[in-house]
Amino acid sequence: VAQHFLASYHIECTDEVKQSVVNTMGTIQDIVAEKCVEYFERYRRRTFVTPKSYLSFIGGYKAIYKEKFTSLGSLSERMRTGLAKLMEAEVSVSQLSKDLVMKEKDLAIASKKAEEVLLEVTMKAHAAEKVKMQVQKVKDKAQAIVDDIAIDKAAAEEKLEAARPALEEAKAALQ
């Protein structure tokens, strides 16, 4: 009976395994029949194994198999999708690694250029500081000269003021 009902039902296995499932179902039916007899002998109550109960057992097997097969198919699909994503990620990581190497080279070149510019700016800053110090020295010397001239001018004006009355007398004496 199991052979008839399971022959057209698709089970994902070899023909030998499918035949083993059919034989196992028959064996289980025989064991249930034996247990019914033992139950009668022990409790004096009759239970029967009917063709309908056997067909129900086969139908239950089919339903459970279909549910588990669908569940495993779903898990298998999720695993395939996950593996595909991992493969994509591997390709992306490989590409990003190559890009990173290129960017590191570019960064090293830019860093070297920045160091050169910094060195040049530092040298120019030192040169500008030297020029500033020289200009400050010249300014200080010029200020000292201006201060000396101002002192001399003040002394000369003081002498001029002291000589002014004599100059006025001399002017008055000349007509």
Image (cartoon, grey):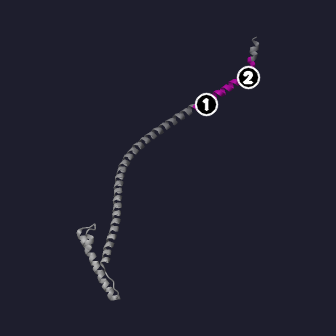
Residue count near mark 1 (Cα–Cα under 10 Å), binned few <14, some 14–19, many ≥20: few
Q: Quadrant of residue 62?
A: bottom left
User: Could you say which is closer to the camera, residue 97 or residue 70?
Assistant: 70
Considering only order in the chain, which callout, 1 or 2, is on the residue closer to the N terminus?
Answer: 1
Q: Nearer the viewer, mark 2 or mark 1?
A: 1
- The correct choice, above or below, for 80 with respect to 154 in the image is below
Residue 101 — which label? none
Residue 161 inside the magenta-drawn segment: yes
Quarter of the picture containing the C terminus is: top right
Magenta part mainly helix, strand or loop? helix
Which residue appears at 36% of the width and 56% of the height? Answer: 85
Comparing 50 with 175, the one in front is 50
Residue 78's spot in the image, x, y percent?
Answer: 36, 61
Residue neighbourhood size for the residue with mark 2, other residues' Cα within 10 Å, grouped as few (<14), some (14–19), many (≥20): few
Give x and y (percent) for residue 14: 24, 67
- Judging from the image, what secondary structure is the residue with disc 2 in? helix
Residue at 71% x, 23% y is 159
Labelled disc at residue 162: 2
Q: Quadrant of the N terminus?
A: bottom left
Question: Please, is residue 66 above or below residue 34 in the view?
Answer: above
Q: Position of residue 100 (x, y in %)?
A: 38, 48
Q: Which residue carries the number 1 mark?
A: 143
Considering depth in this image, is 2 or 133 the residue closer to the camera? 2
- What amino acid is labelled 2 in the image? Ala
Q: What is the distance, in whole Å, between disc 2 and disc 1 at their CAs?
A: 28 Å
Q: As shown in the figure, which amino acid type bears the numbered disc 1?
A: Gln
- What span is colored magenta in the figure? 139-167
Residue located 29% across and 81% down the image? 31
Q: Is residue 166 above or below residue 28?
A: above
Q: Mark 1 falls on what kind of element?
A: helix
